Image (spheres, grey):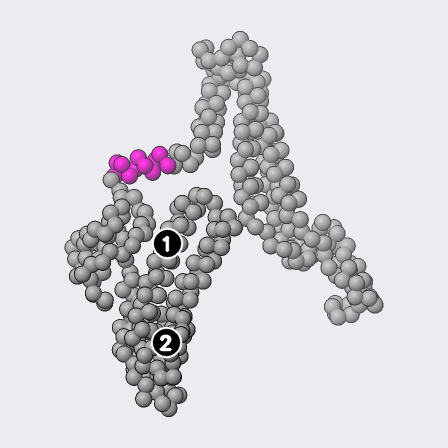
Amino acid sequence: MLVAYLWRSVKRFIDRRFSFNERVTKQAAQSDYEELYTGPEFILQVRFAQFLCTIFVTMTYSSGVPGLYAISFLSLVCTYWIDKLLLLRFYRLTDGYSQHLSSRIVKLAPLAILIHSLFGFMIFSYPYILSSPGVSFIGNQTQYFNENRMGQTHMVVFVIGFLVVWVLLFFEKSIVFLLTKARRLCFKEPRKRAYVAERPQNPQETPGGPRVGYTPGRPGTPTQSMIAAEVGPPEFVFADDVYQELNFKQLFNEYKKLKQEKQRLLAQKAKSRFTPLQLKQYVDDYILIVERNEAAVYKRLRSLTDAHIEAIHEVDPDIMTENEKMKTVLEYYSQATDKNNPLRDHIELDPAMHGCLTSKI
């Protein structure tokens, strides 16, 4: 492909009448010009297949031909830099690729270790290639597993080493899970897990007041206020109080964002864009959090809308939907806070419409 790039560059140089001005060309038709100056498509599947072929051939025969390691290394380095040059200078723009093909290659590449161990066993056990003192109780009377081959010291170390590699390769997730669980049991570390529940009604909690923490697994049980610094913050804290600090316009924009976010997540979930593990670990919990925040913002908007819709003249709230009421109050609030509006001094607003962070114009 590098030769094709050089030959195509020569043809383009001749087409420009041996000049470096890219605007000069001999082509009279647009199709001929595009055919000459547009490179081929970069086929990622072919490059991945060549990569796997290089890796598997190297790992298969490298036990008997160690020079394959250096050859494979130079081949991959040259392929990387040549592809990088050709992607910038030669190939045409292609559609984007997803992560599925790369993930499949990452899963297939470690299998070359299995083939490497089998061929390495046949090569290193041959006494005329590599020999060491034997162990009499290892091996049998077969051709390839007798004591003269299997009982050699280096073969015992070789077999044990690759058994460990196989276990780590095929049972990596199980081993990590068991080690993590053993560490938590030994050091008594709490498991960090998000918990979503309905916010319990606490008569002592007031808007803008202290927030109360709740222990995961026991919804509705207050544990410790965040004011008590000597005890430390709780593991989970509800933060609905932040909506008391936003003004009406900010609340309305936040409500639209949360609604769009929920619709996007539910649409992706309906199209099976998430794996069952992703749904279990964080997607379902995140959807519940978005729905809870949406309900909290909507409740706050409803209370402010009901308190101000009657003050707006020429409006009949009985024939309006809730969204129409909110938009009407939003327009009313925008007129009251617009510094270029000469009538804004005659519009009365409740201080709650500004939130706790009241700004004076």
Amino acid at pointer 1: Leu
Give the x, y percent position of residue 270: 49, 51
Which dot, 2 or 1, sits closer to the camera?
Answer: 2
Q: Quadrant of residue 15?
A: bottom right
Name the foreground residue: 109 vs 305. 305
Give the labeled residue for mark 2. Answer: 317
* 183 to the left or right of 320: left
The majority secondary structure of the magenta stretch comes to helix
* 204 to the left or right of 20: left
Q: Quadrant of the C terminus?
A: bottom left
Q: Earlier in the sequence, mark 2 or mark 1?
A: 1
Give the x, y percent position of residue 323: 41, 70
Name the foreground residue: 305 vs 112. 305
Q: Label for residue 355? A: none
Q: For the point 50% across and 48% down, which residue is it?
A: 272
Of all residues, the one furthest to the front in this rendering is: 318
Q: Which residues are magenta?
A: 177-187
Give the labeled residue for mark 1. Answer: 288
Reply above or below: 102 against 338.
above
Q: For the point 34% across and 58% down, which residue is it?
A: 292
Give the x, y percent position of residue 27: 82, 66
Name the foreground residue: 254 vs 78. 254
Residue 183 within the segment the image draws in magenta? yes
Residue 133 within the segment the image draws in magenta? no
Q: Quadrant of residue 360?
A: bottom left
Label 1 CA crowd tier, 10 Å (few <14, some 14–19, many 20+):
some
* 14 to the left or right of 88: right
